[in-house]
Amino acid sequence: MTDIQTIEAAATTAPHARRRTFAIISHPDAGKTTLTEKLLYFGGAIQLAGEVRAKAGRRQTSSDWMKIERQRGISVVTSVMTFEYGGHVFNLLDTPGHEDFSEDTYRTLTAVDSAVMVIDAAKGIEARTKKLFEVCRLRDIPIVTFINKVDRETRDLFDLIAEIETTLALDVAPMTWPVGRGREFVGTYDLKANTFRRNQKGDESTQDLAVSGPDDPLFDTLLPNGAAETWREEVFLAAEGLKPFDLQSFREGHLTPVYFGAALRDYGVRDLIDALGAYAPSPRAQIADKRAIEADEPKMTGFVFKIQANMDPNHRDRIAFMRVCSGKLSRGMKAKLVRTAKPMPLNAPQFFFARDRSIAEEAYAGDIVGLPNHGTLRIGDTLTEGEDIVFKGVPSFAPEILRRVKLKDAMKAKKLREALQQMAEEGVVQLFLPHDGAPAIVGVVGALQLDVLKERMDVEYSLPVDFEPCQFSIARWVSSDDKAALQKFVSLKPSSMADDLDGDPVFMASSQFTLKYDAERAPEVSFSDVKDYQ
Ligand code: GDP
């Protein structure tokens, strides 16, 4: 089947089969925001590329706590954007660019079926790209690579490909090859179909030209002064010397197809979006505690991977983002919140677009819906049509910074506890309540999370708080098959033990040395720096 036939066939199959739910991973500045804008533009979700940024600006001015974002010029908020193109429904999950909010990114990656890895053609694999790639690999998420900024001076493309292969231990299959580089970058050559897509700004004007192959004289005109010959050698090497594309290997996360382009100028973006439609997987089965849930099962299931407050400053609601994993979600249906076993009516599920949100009358596996709630839903929650299953794998990572929360007005201790609990349920910080009754400790992966907490406590709860260093710098979840041994360990160390949000025991240590010391003396107890929610 050709790519186009695949696209056409997909349009007529089950609704979930048309879904492509993905995220973009990259190092800051590689072009993620620009590419997001262009994808939305191609998908018709926005009229003018540039609105992603513009919208972020509006949001920031309308919400107090986002002052932090504005001041620091970073994006703290993640969201989802849905658009249609070529018969597919794309759900693009945005992730925060700043490393301090990487926990949020990791959780978001639990809700996607594929990812686009954007690489700056002048820089290659950078630190954050590698880290995010590793997270994708843990989950076998297939990756499509987009080598961006080919309109500028680039590194040698074969070097770049070799670097991806060795640094990420991943097979690389170039799908296109750029015709020219820098200012002479005039289009992309499809290595399989032997077609030439001339660079044009915008979607409609993209020109596909039938050529006889790399030897077509057109390329001598486009790449004068002998450049065409060098280019032909490259194309030969790329097509013959490198790995061919293999769908299964890609789907299993062992091979990445590579596309070249310049997002800023719309170049190569259509190649990428077509590839996502043709090759990226439709919603995958999701692992729950009792069994795997297939996307085509008739009963609705889903899990919450993100909670966002203050999306609308006029309403103090919180939006829980749920990935639908199977079945059909219909507005008004009653779902079961498995953690509490209580029914939860889904009266106003929402879809998000670049500019708007709208009520979702129905949603299918792969879709991300926003569920407004006032604190009922937590990160990691499973909603079903009745079955008692719990989805696995929305992780919590041991914090790297621990701080004691100091309240300026001691009379408000109870309110503080409630507010911290809410913030922890939203995943803003982790909360640890020491067994010895000492003031609460919050844990974060990045320091900016503390700034967000402080600002929100002040603005939303009128609770000015400060953070004091505490004697601990390490937190580990403790567990054991031997309940008595665990109990003994916990009771011997009340000043080093705390409960997390779910009441699970956490051991806190002041250094790696003390952690090792105590761990060695309690061999039946295991100490973990990752915890799956629930
Ligand atoms: P992000 O941090 O990954 O979201 O990166 P941005 O999308 O904000 O892009 C970082 C910078 O690179 C901006 O100044 C963009 O205008 C620029 N940029 C993005 N894509 C391209 C491209 O294809 N070509 C060129 N020349 N610049 C680009």
Image (cartoon, rainbow, N blue to C red):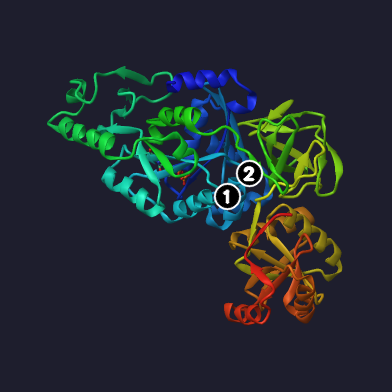
Residue 437 lies in what quarter of the image?
Answer: bottom right
Q: Where is residue 482 in the image (x, y as percent from the top left)?
A: 75, 71
The local crowd at label 1, few if under 14, some if 14 to 19, many if 20 or more residues have their Cα within 10 Å, is: some
Can you see residue 241?
yes
Residue carrying label 1: 70
Residue at image location 42% in from the left, 46% down from the top: 30
Residue depicted at 74% across the width and 25% down the height: 361
Is 3 or 430 nearer to us in this picture?
3
Q: Position of residue 319 (x, y in %)?
A: 73, 42
Residue at position x 56%, y 46% in the image: 95
Q: Is mark 1 on a helix, strand or loop?
A: helix
Q: Where, quadrant-wise, is the C terminus in this rendering?
A: bottom right
- Pointer 2: residues within 10 angstroms few (<14), some, or many (20+)? few
With respect to residue 274, does 438 lie above or below? below
Q: Is residue 433 above or below residue 364?
A: below
Where residue 269 sits: x, y (%)? 42, 31
Is residue 181 among what the camera can see? no
Looking at the image, residue 317 sits to the left or right of residue 427; the answer is right
Residue type pointed to by label 2: Thr
Answer with left or right where residue 366 lies relative to residue 418.
Answer: left
The answer to whether 293 appears left or right of 20 in the picture is: right
Q: What residue type is labelled 1?
A: Arg
The local secondary structure at tag 2 comes to helix
**The residue carrying mark 2 has its beta carbon less than 8 Å from ligand 1:** no
Asked if disc 1 and disc 2 are in contact, CB closer than 8 Å, the reply is yes
Q: Earlier in the sequence, mark 1 or mark 2?
A: 2
Residue 29, image x and y in percent? 43, 47
Q: State the CA–CA distance, disc 1 to disc 2.
A: 8 Å
Q: Name the residue under label 2.
A: 61
On the image, which quarter does residue 384 sit in? top right
In which quadrant is the N terminus drawn?
top left
